[in-house]
Image (cartoon, grey):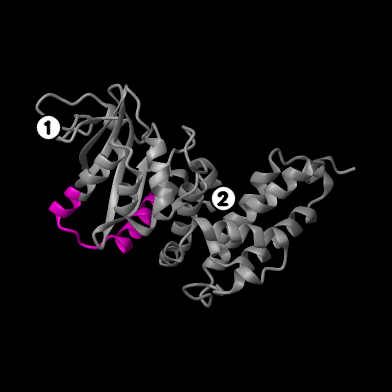
Amino acid sequence: MDHADSVPVAELLDERRHLLEVTYWMLGSSREAESVVGETYRRWYGLSEAERGEIPTPRHWLAKTAGGLCLVLLAHPHRGATGQRDQKEEHHTKTGDAEEAQAGLAKEVSRVLLNALDSLSPAERAAFVLNDVFGMASGTVADIVGRPESECVELADRARHSIRRQRSHSTPPDEHDLLARTVRQACVNEDAELLESLLCPDATAFFDGGGKVRALSRPVHGSRQVAHSLLTLLARHPRTTLTSQSVNGRTGLIARYDHQVAAVVSLDIADHQVAQVWVVLNPDKLRSWNQLPTQGDPGSPGRPSQRGDGRL
């Protein structure tokens, strides 16, 4: 008996669904995703029983193999900007697993975001998808992409900025500031209706926990879902405050628990509404925000905002 493949059926189905989701996000096509997952399993069973038995985490091996196959496809010169994506393909997938995965993803991901991913280089797309969409640790991402960890962090960062530029129109600072402060007020008052009205219908929220805190690992799509996620994250608590403060040169939101920065929220605005929400919860990335300000350094990221304070 091959003990490497002796696992519960629920785990097998979850593993396959996970691979389909990863490959779909990387390729933007359920047909290509199905093909890559099939080839991944063919390579797995191409190993000897002894070789499979020596692999400590089969799911990681499968994800790494599938990721490598995706990178080869993405780099193909004749693939085109959108690969083999078919607008009707979600209704014609060959297996129940692929159809279920596609249907679930369709509820979470807008075609706008998939199109934005098409503008990234293969390595940028892979790093962004694995890090931001699936919340994989940077070391795991580096292993799959086949590049140094520091380079993968930079690739994901570059992809993030590229996507933000595509959705973010030139918004006057005063308008951005007013909208950000109104978002803060809606969160403080737990006003779901107001908050939803401030968001684009196809708004997307990204939650970067870095695998260090229990946060949403995939983007949330749609104004109602984004509003609900933000209100849940920033739920009223006597020791929690939400302030408006400069984040990356534009007004954003800072959530503190006691005096410690627990979340930094930046907003991208398009057509007078919030198009994208970026929530940093990773303690490593928040370290600079929690450093004590140096005397005479008003620009220190750890300095509390002097305006817009509001206890949740």
Quadrant of the snapshot with the N terminus: top right
Q: Give how far across and how far down residue 212 sits, in percent.
A: 47, 32
The kind of residue tagged 1 is Pro
**One can see residue 67 in this view:** no
Q: Residue at x 53, y 66 (%)?
A: 74
Residue situated in front as seen by the camera: 283 or 181: 181
Residue of label 1: 298
Magenta-drawn stretch contains 172: yes
Foreground label between 2 and 1: 1
**Which structural element holds mark 1?**
loop
Q: Residues within 10 Å of mark 1 (few under 14, many from 20)?
A: few
In this rendering, position of residue 236 left or right of residue 11: left
Query: Which numbered dot is residue 144?
Result: 2
Residue segment shown in magenta = 154-178
Q: Give how far across and how far down residue 231 sits, in percent.
A: 38, 39
Among the two numbered marks 2 and 1 on one chain, the one whose residue lies closer to the N terminus: 2
Quadrant of the snapshot with the C terminus: top left
The kind of residue tagged 2 is Ile
Q: Residues within 10 Å of mark 2 (few under 14, many from 20)?
A: many
Q: Give how far across and how far down residue 127 sits, in percent.
A: 47, 52
Task: Determine the CA span between mark 2 and mark 1.
Answer: 41 Å
**Which structural element holds mark 2?**
helix
In this rendering, position of residue 142 left or right of residue 303: right
